[in-house]
């Protein structure tokens, strides 16, 4: 079992490495195809020099690391709270469809408004700070996760539901014994898909509101023609997001395989 898991993880790491190579090739190909000036469109070797070999590279790495920590904090808090709220409300909606019909239309209308429009409004309500950024990330993560988890909770077959009820179980018993286990795949999928959304929400909030983190750093670098710093910050957040997504994808697959073995 351990050997099989190790081989699986090794294959996924190999796939991730191949994806990185493809992304680097596309990066260079797009810049060259559109003849983007090297002064503006930095190539992978330019970014490598900025953070590793150039004069002041240590300071560059320290600055990027500090901004990255802020962005990870901003995205992480909203990510966890958004997923938890989505799961809790999905359970409530599963028990009370009437409440779902009251709340969901409002949520759908709110989610249809572009995030760049909502960000200033949320900032006015919650202020410039952690609360406002968290609210924006929650908004981005919450609704897609709610829809996926609710779908998983309602994927229980009629036969399983009838069997539990026939043995004297209640609706809560169906929820605990059948619906919640059935929602594990959709919950894990929501957790995986929400990673890039949470990072995007945090970056937009930092760009338009707080001016901190990598979102704020990219905005400041672009405004001051610091294209090396801008590209290095963008590649850093893309790499961290890709890594987090890959880790959650591995966890998702392993958990679902384990569930399949137990069922």
Image (cartoon, rainbow, N blue to C red):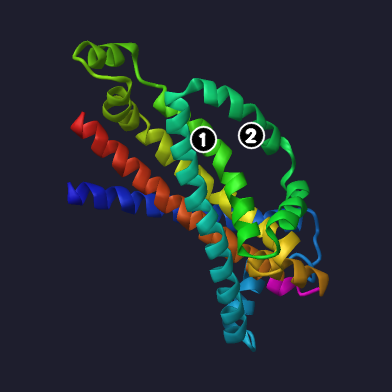
Residue 7: horizontal and vertical position, in percent?
27, 50
Residue at 77% across, 54% down? 120
Question: Tag on residue 146?
Answer: 1
- Residue at 20% across / 33% down in the picture? 261
Which region is colored magenta?
A: 225-229
Q: Residue at 30% across / 41% down in the picture?
A: 255
Task: For label 2, count other residues whose C-alpha is less than 10 Å away and answer few (under 14), some (14-19) or many (20+).
Answer: few
Inspect the magenta stretch and tell me whether residue 226 lies in it.
yes
| Residue 236 in sight from this viewpoint | yes
Identified at 58% across, 22% down, the residue is 101
Q: Where is mark 2, residue-wise?
A: 107
Majority secondary structure of magenta residues: helix
Residue 187: percent from left, percent from top: 42, 38
Q: Quadrant of residue 23?
A: bottom right
In the displayed structure, 219 sits above or below 192; it is: below
- Dot 2 falls on a residue whose secondary structure is helix
Q: Nearer the viewer, mark 1 or mark 2?
A: 2
């Amino acid at each position: 079992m351990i050997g099989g898991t190790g081989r699986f993880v090794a294959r996924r790491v190999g796939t991730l490495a191949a994806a990185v190579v493809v992304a680097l090739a596309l990066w260079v190909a797009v810049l060259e195809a559109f003849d983007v000036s090297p002064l503006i469109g930095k190539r992978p070797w330019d970014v490598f020099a900025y953070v590793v070999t150039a004069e002041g590279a240590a300071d560059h790495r320290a600055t990027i690391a500090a901004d990255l920590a802020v962005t990870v904090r901003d995205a992480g808090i909203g990510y966890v709270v958004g997923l938890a709220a989505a799961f809790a409300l999905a359970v409530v909606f599963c028990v009370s469809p009437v409440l779902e019909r009251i709340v969901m239309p409002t949520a759908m209308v709110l989610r249809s408004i572009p995030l760049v429009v909502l960000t200033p409004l949320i900032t006015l309500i919650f202020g410039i700070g952690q609360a406002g950024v968290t609210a924006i990330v929650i908004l981005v993560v919450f609704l897609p996760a709610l829809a996926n988890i609710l779908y998983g909770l309602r994927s229980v077959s009629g036969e399983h539901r009838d069997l539990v009820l026939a043995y004297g179980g209640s609706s809560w018993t169906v929820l605990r014994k059948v619906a919640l286990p059935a929602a594990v795949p959709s919950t894990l999928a929501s957790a995986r898909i929400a990673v890039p959304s949470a990072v995007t929400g945090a970056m937009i909030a930092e760009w338009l509101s707080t001016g901190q983190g990598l979102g704020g750093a990219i905005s400041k670098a672009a405004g001051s023609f610091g294209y090396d710093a801008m590209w290095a910050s963008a590649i850093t957040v893309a790499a961290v997001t890709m890594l987090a997504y890959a880790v959650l994808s591995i966890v998702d697959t392993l958990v679902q395989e384990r569930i399949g073995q137990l069922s």
